[in-house]
Amino acid sequence: MSPADPPGPQAAPPEPPGTSAETALRQCLQNAPDGIVLLDRDARVVFGNGKACELLGIGASAAPLALPELLTPEERERWLQYPPAPLLLAAQARPGRPGDLWLCAGEGCLRGMAVLRPADARMYEQAHIHLLSQALDSSDNAIFLCDDQSRIRYVNAGFVRMLGYAPEEALGKQPRELIRGPHTDVATLDRLGEQHRAGRAHREHLLGYCKDGSPLWLSVVATPLADASGSLVNVFTDITEAKTHEVLNGKVLDALVREEPLATTMALMCQEVERVAPDLRVVVTRGEADGQLCTLAAPAPLMAAGASGWEHPACMQALRRGRAVVIEDIASAPLFDSQRDALLALGLRACWSNPIRSTAGQVLGTLAFHCHRPGPPTAWHRRLADLCLHLCALALEREQARSRMHRLAFYDVLTGLPNRLMFNALSEQPLIQAEQQGTPMALLFVTLDRFKRINESQGHAAADGLLRDLARRLHDIVGPESVVARQVADEFTVLVPCCAQHQAAALCEQLLAMIATPTVVGSMTLHASASIGVAMFPEDGRAMETLLRHADLAMRRAKDEGGGRFRFFSADMNQLAQERLLLEATLRDSLRQGGLRLHYQPQVRGDGRGLYGVEALLRWRHPHLGDIPPNRFVPLAEECGLMAELSHWVMEEACRQHADWRRRGLAIPRVAVNLSASAFELPSLVEQVRQLLERHGLSPGSLVLEITESVMLSAQPQVSANLHALHALGVRLSLDDFGTGYSSLSHLHRLPISEMKLDRSFISEIGHDPAASALILSVLRIGESLGKHVVAEGVETDAQRRFLIDNGSPALQGYLFSPALSPGALEQWLGERAYAPSPRH
Ligand code: C2E
Ligand code: CA
Ligand code: CA
């Protein structure tokens, strides 16, 4: 036989020469019940006995058959490897194959021998059972078979792994004998048994125990076998993890989403933990600012045993150290000396407390598990704790955020006092009580006088300091049952329960005196005063809204009267307030529909050489109320935001009138216009004035703007910029009501004003008060030396005129000469005095 010419399988090899033993052997081989083939190096069949030829379906004439064709690719691979190893190629039946092949390595030209055995049903079955048991064993579930007596007949490897019992420990036992533990629900067990005996399919969830006593949640599914033997296939699945997540995460997260109170959510969590792990008792605490612990949830017996909150030794330690504290046996732990007996009496042996940490790592509180068994926490308990810690942190952080929001929403950031919303909420209870008990109450409305000025002239920091100081003083002086709040800006309210009118008056006196003591803010000493309005419950109102409105009105009255005082509300204030509202609306209409007029009051020269100028003064004739003095409606315009519009109208109208007079040959040197403080805050003011003058062809020097001292002293950069820009434009600035305010003479020096108007109150004292006369004289001298004109206002008598003229007053204005006149009347007045050429009509 040459390798290049492989022979076919020899169905009936020629009788080789040899011994009779060899012949017998050959015969045996030839007639063996198994098919036997010999293979060459290339795994080609070089010999096959009778059975093999039959099995392979080959005859003597057939082409040489390569064994690899009988093999799967993997088997072929293994066979062709060198050196060849003996192979049991087919331990199981392979459909479509002749049967098992045992291949043995051989030497020389023979590479191996194969034994072929025809596949039979038994082999298939055996192989099937083998596969099945492999599959069952590889499952993570505990699968076992029970007979009709509920006795275990078979367990898979998963059963051994899950529950820890060897097959021989389980066989013959009832499942309940194995899995029942201290907290297993007996009713469920009984139900399972019943279903078992009835041979019915059923499923349950159950807390069971492993051989080592560790608990686990099982899903039990039992299915009867189809053979009517009453046997059941049981599958246990470990659902501990899923169960834990389902009840804890599901329910607790749901409570969080529903914004349940913190304590409710934590109690729910503890209850759920104790439901899935009945051997545990849970305590949750929150760390307080003072380093103590506040109990959020704890079983009542533990609270009674002094094992909750700051009394809990393990929790206190966990909080302070910021890491877990594990007490494996309370019976021997010195830490629990004080609570030991009580805890042991409750059957609790071990304790494990963990710090609850925020996402930022801050310790927010503690979570403690108490266990009925001594020892360290099991892996499951650890996972349970991790989950709970996560939920606790979530709940506590939300609570923190909520209380921060609460503070922002209900408390004033600057003073820490309740804000308007909180004040309303806090005053509800005292109102109800006063109503029920018939006790009087006082509501005080407190504001600082000239706060805006302080803010502008001393800066925001000083003003804030003043407000904080006032808040502190208010808080200190009223009793703890009173409610103090900051409404807005410098407005504070104080609700004083059980307070009669005379007591309220005494309290106001006390407050005013206290506010009058200087406040030191940084390096500044501020002198403040306040105005207080008081409304009494129930006379001045029963609802907080009414009381607030009335106290506010009374406060305004106190302010109008000069501040630094308190006023009780009276009914006439209410009427005034209503009138005010009505006026406001009509004023708006009048301004827009041409219902306002300007009258002009002449100012005469002190040297008797004609007209110095005129002052434009607003006049308003109300459709029903008649003439309303500017002192009443100008502040109203300020309050209702009409001032910019009003100022613009006055300037426009004054310039128009002036230009008209000029056009008609009426030489009026200058027209003075009153501008309120708020008009000077407009960035557009200078441009507005420039355009106005240009449009009417007036020189800037013919316009005088009268300003008050508060404008002059304003610290606002815009105001000061406007003043300087107007001055640079050539417009004259006049300081009105000079002498009544705070401006010191030194201010005059550096301010861009051209003129001072000596206030009427000094002029009226001429001849009565020598001090007033002396002051007038010194003002006139200063004006002279600074090169500023002094206009004397409110000259009513000849004696006043004489005094002023004798002392060199440059200009005089007052009823002695003329009140403010309509343009026509002024023209007539001028014509009569020949102060100016008659107008050309
Ligand atoms: P004021 O600027 O001090 O104006 C002088 C006020 O004194 C005017 O009152 C005038 O009629 C009055 N008066 C003039 N001479 C005498 C006198 O000899 N004796 C007395 N007892 N009073 C005299 P009026 O017109 O009622 O204006 C009151 C205040 O209203 C003005 O005080 C001014 O502050 C304000 N006001 C008037 N018109 C305007 C305006 O157009 N704009 C602004 N912002 N305020 C204005
Ligand atoms: Ca004036
Ligand atoms: Ca004045």
Image (cartoon, rainbow, N blue to C red):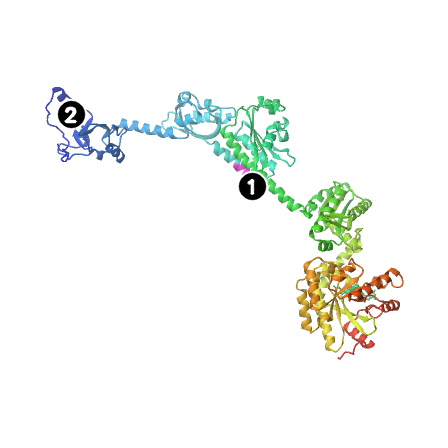
Task: Answer above or below: position of 26 versus 608.
Answer: above
Quadrant of residue 137 in the image? Answer: top left
Query: What span is colored magenta in the figure?
Result: 249-259
What kind of residue is marked 1? Val
Q: Secondary structure at mark 2?
A: helix
What kind of residue is marked 2? Gln
Does the magenta stretch mainly form a helix, a strand or a loop? Answer: helix
Image side of residue 838 versus residue 418, left or right:
right
Q: Position of residue 218 (x, y in %)?
A: 46, 29
Disc 1 under 8 Å from ligand 1? The reply is no
Find residue 615 and name its label. none
Residue 96 can be seen, yes or no: no
Image side of residue 725 versus residue 267, left or right:
right
Quadrant of residue 221 in the image? Answer: top left
Q: Which residue is mark 2?
A: 30
Q: Residue furthest front?
A: 785
Image side of residue 139 versus residue 737, left or right:
left
Q: Position of residue 90 (x, y in %)?
A: 26, 29
Ranked by sequence position, the earlier of labels 2 and 1 is: 2
Q: Position of residue 799 (x, y in %)?
A: 89, 67
Q: Which residue is mark 1?
A: 257
